[in-house]
Amino acid sequence: VSLGDLPTPAALVDLDRLQANCRWMSRRFAGRGVSLRPHVKTHKVPAIARMQVEGHSGGVTVSTLAEARAFAAAGFEDLCWALPLPPSRIDEALDLARGIRLSLLVEHPRTAELLERSARRRGQRVSVRLEVDCGYGRTGVLPSAPSSLALARQLSDSDWLELEGLLSHAGHAYGARGAAAISAIADQETRVTVGFAEALRAQGVPVRVVSTGSTPTCRRGEHFEGVTEVRPGNYALFDLHQAAIGACELDEIALEVLATVIGVYSDRVVLDAGALALSKDPGASHAGLRGYGLVMDLQRRELPLELSSLSQEHGIATGDPGGLEPGDRVRILPNHSCLVTALHPELVGHRGGRVEARWQPVRGW
Ligand code: PLP
């Protein structure tokens, strides 16, 4: 099967680019003695995660319990669920943790209390990590707040919770522009999270794991002293946002959406890839990114079209249609790979246009 035979829209994964991206990140951290625990939410496919963990311990990060269950069933035995634990899912998480190593994320004393209560009732010890806000401002405790030390003590003093250590995510790196700005955010994450680990140790709270990382900071950061583990995920595929902020090159992007021209007008072309094939993520507009994706021909040459609006199943690419006709195919580099793979029932792995793999990403929560 070649790309010309596929029904569209289709999510394509370039296997050579994927493997090069996986190898680069694996080597970078193996060389520093830092363990790579890739975040699999970017693709939700166990076969891709196996490429990512080569040369490392085999541990992965998941974003949903559905991913955790599917990856456990596929043979992954060391998972970290990197979402503050929803109290509504405690029993399911503890059920799964009976068969594999599953570490849960806590950042509020009430969640810690509810988790401990369930663990005690079940007679089951459970591993937890304390989430630290390293400057992103989404979730996590602030190292400077006295309540953060109190929560760390609550976790480490518990008979039923095993505090592995700290976890942070520098998501604010996505608002940066250029390698130097990203590297400065990586330094900040290391400083804040390692600094809090040292402060806790000085207070007698054992901290074994210091887990940090995003794709931009792991790609462009330089200083990881004191970090024991990193969790980038997007780097397996990359996308236009990463390229726009300087975290990757355009040529490294391994995910594309294959689409068919369904309408041609003097000022625009209409494609069969709308919001449900590309997502409406606007990408890095602060870094000059415009449109919902980069439209290219089948030879991966950029076309003079701007994917300026999407409806559910229509993609409107404004500009000179050139010689395009209904039935012609285009390749689109997406703004945000993680959302695109989450929208498609299948990822099609190809090498130079020949289809070699078809994967069904995990669905649901
Ligand atoms: N860790 C956490 C907690 C995350 O939320 C994410 C992504 O959102 C990652 C790691 C992976 O980062 P990236 O998507 O930049 O690879």
Image (cartoon, rainbow, N blue to C red):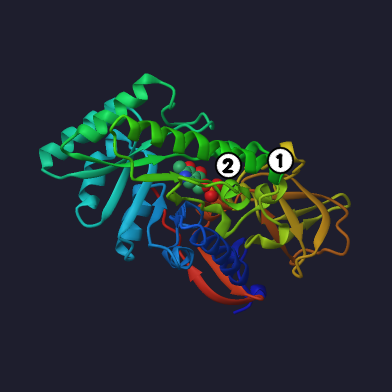
Q: Nearer the viewer, residue 82 or 311?
A: 82
Density class for disc 1 (Cα within 10 Å; few <14, some 14-19, many ≥20) is: some
The CA distance from mark 2 to mark 1 is: 13 Å
Residue 292 vertical position relative to residue 176 in the rendered view, above or below:
below
In the image, what residue occupies the spot 34% across and 53% down? 79
Location of residue 60 in the rendering, given as x and y in whole percent from the top left corner: 40, 56
The dot on residue 186 is 2
Lateral position of residue 316 relative to residue 342, left or right: right
Q: Nearer the viewer, residue 133 or 83?
A: 133
Q: Nearer the viewer, residue 279 or 235?
A: 235
Residue 58 vertical position relative to residue 274 in the rendered view, above or below:
below
Amino acid of disc 2:
Ala
Q: Marks 2 and 1: which is nearer the front?
A: 2
Q: Which residue in the rendered view is the most extreme toward the front? A: 202
Disc 2 residue lies near ligand 1 with CB under 8 A: no
Location of residue 291 in the rendering, given as x and y in whole percent from the top left corner: 74, 45
The dot on residue 177 is 1
Amino acid of disc 1:
Arg
